Amino acid sequence: MHILSLDEGTTSARAVVFDREARSMGMESAPIECRFPHQGWVEQDAQQIWQAQVEAARGALDRSGLRARDLAAIGITNQRETTIVWDRKTGAPVAPAIVWQCRRTADFCRALTEQGLAGRIAARTGLVLDAYFSASKIRWILDHVPDARRRAEAGELAFGTVDSWLVYKLTGGRAHVIDLSNASRTMLLNLDGAWDAEMLDLFGVPQPMLPRVVGSSEVVGATERALFGAEIPIAGIAGDQQAALVGQACFRPGLSKNTYGTGCFLLMHTGERAIHSRHRLLTTLAASPNNRPEYALEGSVFIAGAAIQWLRDSLGIIKTASETATLAASVSGTAGVYFVPAFVGLGAPHWNASARGSIMGLTRATSAAHIVRAALEAIAYQTRELVEAMEADAGAPLTELRADGGAAANDFLMQFQADLLGRPVVRPANIETTALGAAYLAGLAVKVWSGTEEIESFWKVDRRFHPQMDAARREELYAGWKRAVAAVMAQASSPAAVL
Ligand code: ADP
């Protein structure tokens, strides 16, 4: 039996068919457009999200040479926090999907911060008060779409994140659900895994519009026969980063993965214990295969691989991202150059929205290779800051770091990361861990796989990078980075948000 994984990202909807050995049998993707109607606003068309996902699913089935009746289940993973509100009767969205990156509610969130509510919100939800999460986005729709608030209170409108929307459409409107991992990003769920009356009240979100919270690995409905030619159980749902944690077989406390993409997302499994961060990380629900609340600590870096794109597209000093590995290795160090890529502010653990990027330590001898190397090293330095915050919160050292995402293909970066952490960095054979994680959750629910031990047996190492740098050199380099970040923070137009 096979599993179809739907991976609905920010720029495209992808679909992958996996076999019983977790091998990819066929894959297809379809692009999704983002619209930017005002500065800082980011929107998508929910109908297009749906169309693109169906197109990708049908394409992946075709490519794998399989039919819907060969599928044991569907798993879904998705861009998180993105907010959709639709009419329960017609299924039509009442507003564009407000994408996670959208800053339109930043002023509202700032006002809540000024009222001193950030600490209370963090204690209830595990999240840092920010426009990133869904709650303020729902409120915006209810405040701006005519009659929306009254209709939401009367139960005529439904709210969902992208997983909810896809399940609703796949089941022909029969299921209105959200899984624990996605729900924990709305800022409306408390850490016990229930909608929180205090948060609903604070953000003015009426209870009747909320989806039913379900586990990440259970059958929640079946697809309409007309869509793919057979009814397929929908059996796994997780937000993209929590899905990647499953795809990396991180099922036990302490196991951690870092996804090196546009940004970096580091998640550490903390088991059945929700750890409240003292270092401004997020506490989030993991996608648990046994449907009991399990938790993770999460830290995100906004600009990682994106700095490499910038070197290519804006400065033009490289032609491809992959050539950075050899270029960086062509010099023995950066000769004192530090590149702090705070293009959109700094994320965890600094959370300063007004910080801006900087390249420091330039001399007449600085070459393109030094700058490229400094950009790659910055990815590793930022990751070390997250790792240190996590270890301090968890009270235990990280034993090894599992890497995935596009930039994990860079051998220089992986080696420098191991050197800088003084810990091994492990790159698995399959770095497409997001789609795989959703497939695992679905396959476990319908018993295609017997349990997490079997999943662990699929996880294969491509390469293990062992630390080689001596400790004194490592700490000297890291101290230089800290000074560079301090300089960037000193230059920022406003101080970091206070929790
Ligand atoms: P996302 O899912 O965030 O769109 P991916 O996981 O596909 O990103 O990774 C793409 C990012 O990684 C881009 O920002 C790109 O610049 C960077 N990248 C890709 N390959 C490499 C490489 N070999 N070395 C460094 N960065 C890379």
Image (tube, rainbow, N blue to C red):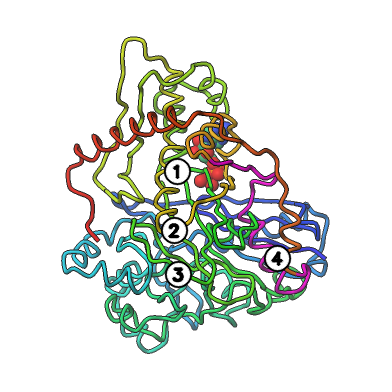
Disc 1 from disc 3: Cα separation: 22 Å
Residue found 53% across the figure and 61% down from its top: 269
Ligand 1 within 8 Å of disc 1? The answer is no
Q: Residue 383, which numbered label?
A: 1
Q: Is residue 437 covered in magenta?
A: yes
Compared to residue 478, the image places residue 347 above or below, namely: below
**Does label 4 or label 1 sit earlier along the sequence?**
1
> Is disc 2 placed on a helix, strand or loop?
loop
- CB atoms at circles 3 and 4 under 8 Å apart? no
What's the amino acid at mark 4?
Answer: Thr
Compared to residue 131, the image places residue 359 above or below, namely: above
Question: What is the crowding at mark 3: few (fewer than 14 residues within 10 Å), some, or many (at least 20)?
Answer: many
Residue found 29% across the figure and 75% down from its top: 203
> Is disc 3 placed on a helix, strand or loop?
loop
**Does label 4 or label 2 sit earlier along the sequence?**
2
Residue 290 percent coordinates (x, y): 63, 74
**Does label 3 or label 4 sit earlier along the sequence?**
3
Q: Residue 395, which numbered label?
A: 2
Question: What is the crowding at mark 1: few (fewer than 14 residues within 10 Å), some, or many (at least 20)?
Answer: many
Please name the residue that numbered disc 4 is placed on: 452
What's the amino acid at mark 1?
Answer: Thr
**Does label 3 or label 2 sit earlier along the sequence?**
3
Residue 82 percent coordinates (x, y): 44, 63
Q: Nearer the viewer, mark 2 or mark 1?
A: 2
Residue 33 percent coordinates (x, y): 48, 51
What's the amino acid at mark 2?
Answer: Gly
- Residues in magenta, as a range: 423-450
Residue found 35% across the figure and 49% down from its top: 347
